[in-house]
Image (cartoon, rainbow, N blue to C red):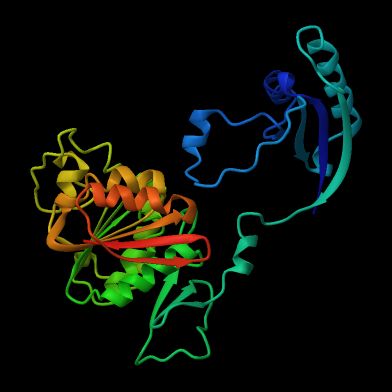
Amino acid sequence: MKWIKFTLDTHSDAVDLLSCMLSEIGVEGIEIEDHVPLSESEKKQMYVDILPDPEFNDGSAKIHFYMEPEQVNPEKVILDVQGIFQEIRRYTNIGKGSISLSETEDKDWMNSWKSFFRPFRAAENVIIKPTWEKNTLSDYSPEHDIVIDIDPGIAFGTGTHETTKLCIQALSRYGCAGKRILDIGCGSGILAIAALKLGAAYAAACDIDEAAVRVAEENMKVNGIASGLYNLYTGDLIQNTAADHSYTFSSPVSPETKESGKLKDQLGGGYDIVVANILADVIIPLSAVVRPHMSENGLFLASGIIDSRADDVERALTETSFSVLAKEKLGEWVCFAAR
């Protein structure tokens, strides 16, 4: 099925007014293109280390919306939009104030990315396979390899990114057999699952996003992980830590027992490996609060770090009494192993 794509050429000053008035004529969703620079609060919400290069802001903006041909009269929509332009031009800059039409093919945008996610080897003995693929790699060895089935859903973490590969390789290299694992910022749960399939005795995983935790739970089930081997939590460990870094730990509890206290208390301590594949700006403050969750000789695997921020992270680790054992790099990304 084809869709009619309507494009409004306007000015960024008019975008908010237009979006409100378009809803009154039956437009249910819009796309906005502009060159307005990101605010500091927006940058913090993006959770990325590399921001796009800023563009020159000439004030121009485009608004796109889509309608089904069978359910719309394009000529009437054009007239309605032109009427809106005429009405608001008295209050704001509408720029060109024009509307154009084109056709676009219907696509399953929610699932089209799946064609790019195929089975691959994340570590020497770890293969990642999407749940919708029946076969694994041709060099798969049941005696040597573990296979992790992943459907990331709306959570980050297929394992294809360099940062996740670095973490899985480190888990394999340092060994998980019989150990307790804590995965901070778990996303799809891939690292906790990898650790459990590599022989870990128990894994706790947390994320600030409830949707990610739900996806992680489904992936645990898909991989046949027994419910007694893991617990999943929603929360921000950094925000839930006392300013003086004091802790009183209780035993890990089920995710349903939300009234049991702060996340730091729910997670408890004594973890042999703590893995955090997040961002430099999160790893740095996390390094100051993660130690009480670790066993006496525990290992901290910190990844998600762009190479330009590696020195900042290494400095934070040493300032919080960690000793860096290894600094592994893949592409532009860095993973630290520290005790």
The residue located at (38%, 73%) in the rendering is 169
Quarter of the picture holding the C terminus:
bottom left
Q: Quadrant of residue 28?
A: top right
- Which residue is drawn at the image coordinates 74% and 19% (left, top)? 14
> In the image, residue 51 lies at what x, y percent?
57, 43
Position of residue 90 in the picture relative to residue 246 (left or right): right
Is residue 100 found left or right of 282 in the rendered image? right
Screen quadrant of the N terminus: bottom right
The picture places residue 146, in percent across and down from the top left corner, at: 37, 81
Label total for image: 0
Name the side, left or right, on which 135 lies relative to 164: right
Residue sitting farthest toward the top = 90
**Image quarter of residue 70:** top right
Q: Residue at x 9, y 47 (%)?
A: 249
Question: Can see residue 147?
Answer: yes
Q: Is residue 234 visible?
A: no
> Eyeballing the image, is 94 above or below 225?
above
Q: Position of residue 43 (x, y in %)?
A: 52, 35
- Residue 39 shown left or right of residue 74 in the figure: left
Residue 32: horizontal and vertical position, in percent? 70, 34
87 or 117, which lies in front? 117
Q: Residue furthest right?
A: 75
Residue appearing at x 27%, y 48% in the figure: 287
